[in-house]
Image (cartoon, grey):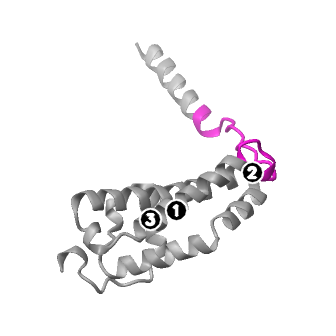
Amino acid sequence: MKRVLFIVWAIVIWQIAGWTFGQRPAPPPPPPDVDPRTTSTEKYLVDGRDMKRQDGLGALDLPPSRICTEDGRKKFVSALGNYYAHRQDEMEYYPKSFGRSGARYIAEQWASSDDKRIDRLTQETYTRGYLKPDEFTPAARKLIVSIVKDERVTGKGCAS
């Protein structure tokens, strides 16, 4: 009996030592530094960004009376949320897939005058109380929160 317990104990110790001191898998290599403009689908993605911008601007151009209706609210959250979620996803995807040049490229792509206008209107809508980050998906919320982080809500939004 003691011999069996000793063998079981030795196997357990051997297993723990293997887990602790064994070889770890190598970390994945960094992504290649590839220019994303050379991919076959980038032309379509650029067009998609323009459509997302128009949807985002359309949502922010809705009058407050429309944002406060059930249908208007759904449209507002959906369109603005899609814009910010798409932007956030690409801001994370391009550096992982294309390296530093991908990070630079996508930062430039999302820095147009329309993007700056959307960010400014988002801040204004937030300060007036019409925008609540909790209503958006996690990807959209992450970017929205970073955009409105220095803003203070001064209005009552739909409650007024």
Query: Disc 2 or 3, which lies upstream in sequence?
Result: 3
What residue is pinned by disc 3? Answer: 58
Looking at the image, residue 107 lies above or below residue 148: above
The magenta segment is 17-42
Q: Which residue type carries mark 1?
A: Gln
Secondary structure type for disc 2? helix
Q: Earlier in the sequence, mark 1 or mark 2?
A: 1
Using a 10 Å C-alpha cutoff, classify the residue at mark 2 as few (fewer than 14 neighbours), some (14 to 19) or many (20 or more).
Answer: some
> Disc 2 designates what residue?
98
Which secondary structure, mark 3? helix
Front in this rendered view, residue 13 or 141 = 141
Looking at numbered disc 3 in the image, what kind of residue is underneath it?
Answer: Gly
Spot occupied by residue 70 in the image (x, y as percentages of width and height): 22, 59
Quadrant where the C terminus is found in the figure: bottom left
Q: Quadrant of residue 91?
A: bottom right
Residue 140 sits above or below residue 66 on the image: above
Closer to the eye: label 1 or 2: 1
Q: Residue at 57% across / 75% down in the picture? A: 116
Check the image and report above or below for 42 versus 109.
Answer: above
Within-10-Å neighbours for mark 1: few <14, some 14–19, many 20+: some
Labels 3 & 1 near each other (Cβ < 8 A): yes
Residue 49: image x %, image y %? 60, 56
Between circles 2 and 3, the one closer to the viewer is 3
Callout 2, which amino acid? Phe
User: How far is the residue under mark 2 from the one under mark 3?
Assistant: 31 Å
Residue 97 appears left or right of 87: right
